[in-house]
Amino acid sequence: GVVTGMDATKYLQNHRDRVEMNAKISMEAARVNANLTQDQMAEKLGVTRQTYATWEKGKAEMRPAYFIAFCRITGFPEDAISLPKDLP
């Protein structure tokens, strides 16, 4: 399942052994955990807030280079992030 909001860090700390297998967090949870607003994340990625918001909401697909940068910024491995298109 997807862990959202401020519970992400605690969840990952408590379930570190299982995280690599199946637990994923949303892009929003990863961003919030990094204490960044959509504006700040967009600036770090070099895109507009509107562009970033479409990625976070799953309205547009994020190019791999941006996703790799997103993971580097948030400190989460790529396989720990659930992209919106993967959400139920």
Image (spheres, rainbow, N blue to C red):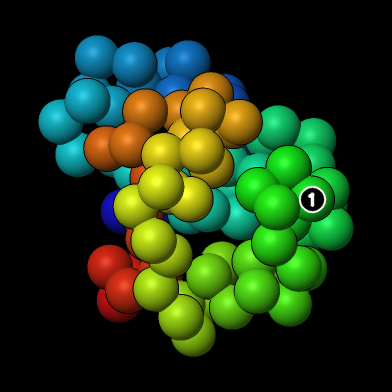
Identify whether 11 is placed above or below 62: above
Residue 34 placement (x, y as % from top left):
70, 32
Decide: few, some or many residues near mark 1? Use Cα within 10 Å; few <14, some 14-19, many ≥20. few
Q: Which residue is mark 1?
A: 43
Residue 58 placement (x, y as % from top left):
46, 77
In-image side of 20 versus 56 (left or right): left
User: Looking at this view, is 67 or 46 the one in front?
Assistant: 46
Q: Amino acid at mark 1?
A: Glu
Residue 1 placement (x, y as % from top left):
31, 53
Give the residue at x 51% y 38%.
Answer: 69
User: Looking at this view, is 62 or 12 the one in front?
Assistant: 62
In-image side of 34 versus 27 (left or right): right
Q: Looking at the rendering, which quadrant does residue 10 occupy?
A: top right
In-image side of 38 versus 59 (left or right): right
The C terminus: image quadrant: bottom left
Identify whether 65 is placed above or below 49: above
Give the residue at x 68% y 35%.
Answer: 33
As drawn, the residue found furthest toward the left would be 21
Q: Is residue 32 visible?
A: no
Q: Is residue 47 visible?
A: yes
Q: Looking at the rendering, which quadrant does residue 57 occupy?
A: bottom right
Give the residue at x 76% y 68%.
Answer: 48
User: Looking at this view, is 47 or 9 the one in front?
Assistant: 47
Q: Looking at the rendering, which quadrant does residue 12 occupy?
A: top left
Residue 79 placement (x, y as % from top left):
27, 37
Give the residue at x 65% y 48%.
Answer: 45
Label count reads 1
In-image side of 6 versus 21 (left or right): right
Q: Secondary structure at mark 1?
A: helix
